Image (cartoon, rainbow, N blue to C red):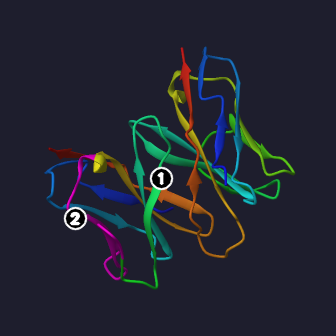
Amino acid sequence: KAGVTQTPRYLIKTRGQQVTLSCSPISGHRSVSWYQQTPGQGLQFLFEYFSETQRNKGNFPGRFSGRQFSNSRSEMNVSTLELGDSALYLCASTPGLAGAAETQYFGPGTRLLVL
Amino acid sequence: GENVEQHPSTLSVQEGDSAVIKCTYSDSASNYFPWYKQELGKGPQLIIDIRSNVGEKKDQRIAVTLNKTAKHFSLHITETQPEDSAVYFCAAGRDYKLSFGAGTTVTVRA
């Protein structure tokens, strides 16, 4: 079974621009979560989508948004980029059906550099 | 929200020795505790996990223990090998959200 894929793998943007990142979950998984990883803050939860609905949200400003499509693929968008948005953005997928927390399978990440 | 603390931040061990990483969590409702290994340029990979109804779990050279009363859990790696060198993250969660520790950089000296 193919793993979680993320595109692009690397991205360079300038301050004020916006960016869209894409994540394709493992086949059959319906939940996609997004995380931001930085050396200073570690892995921080952004949001989680299930069946095209945002089910959970972390403490990030409204510049960070996401969506999920009917095939479970997900995109996240960051508008008005700031230097501090430079990070590795990871997505993770799970089947999304259990009442308890499930094992999350991570993709390789998209490394975003904001200049 | 959940707060997970992880210690130590760096750990250097001689090949063949054991490595122990400890984490504490704050939300008593958390019921799932995975450990991830992250190698350079890759996303985190699950190495072992434990749920709140289990006190200990072992998988070959890796074991995890959970003390729900004290709200702490630990990762034990025995007979360390050079390929065990990586960053290890603990996490605690419930429902559909995980909170991660800051990570431990493990270096295994040959």
Q: Position of residue A93 (x, y in %)?
A: 65, 55
Q: Position of residue B57 (x, y in %)?
A: 37, 77
Q: Is residue B57 left or right of residue A63?
A: left
**What residue is drawn where x is 31% and y is 78%?**
B70
Q: In front here: B102 or B27?
A: B102
**What residue is drawn where x is 39% and y is 54%?**
B89
Q: Is residue B103 left or right of residue A14?
A: left
Chain letter behind tag 2: B
Which range of residues does the magenta coloring cover?
A: B58-82
Vertical comparison of B29 with A36: above or below: below
Asked whether the residues under marks 1 and 2 belong to the same chain, the reply is yes
Q: In front here: B59 or A96?
A: B59
Q: Which mark is residue B78?
A: 2
Q: Which residue is mark 1?
A: B45
- Badge 1: residue crowd in 10 Å (few <14, some 14–19, many ≥20): some
Q: Position of residue A100 (x, y in %)?
A: 61, 75
Q: Amino acid at mark 2?
A: Thr
Quadrant, the N terminus of chain A: bottom right
Q: In front here: A17 or A22?
A: A22
Instruction: Classify mark 1: helix, strand or loop.
Output: strand
Q: Quarter-wise, where is residue A51 in the image?
A: bottom right
Of the two numbered discs 1 and 2 on the same chain, state the one appearing first in sequence.
Answer: 1
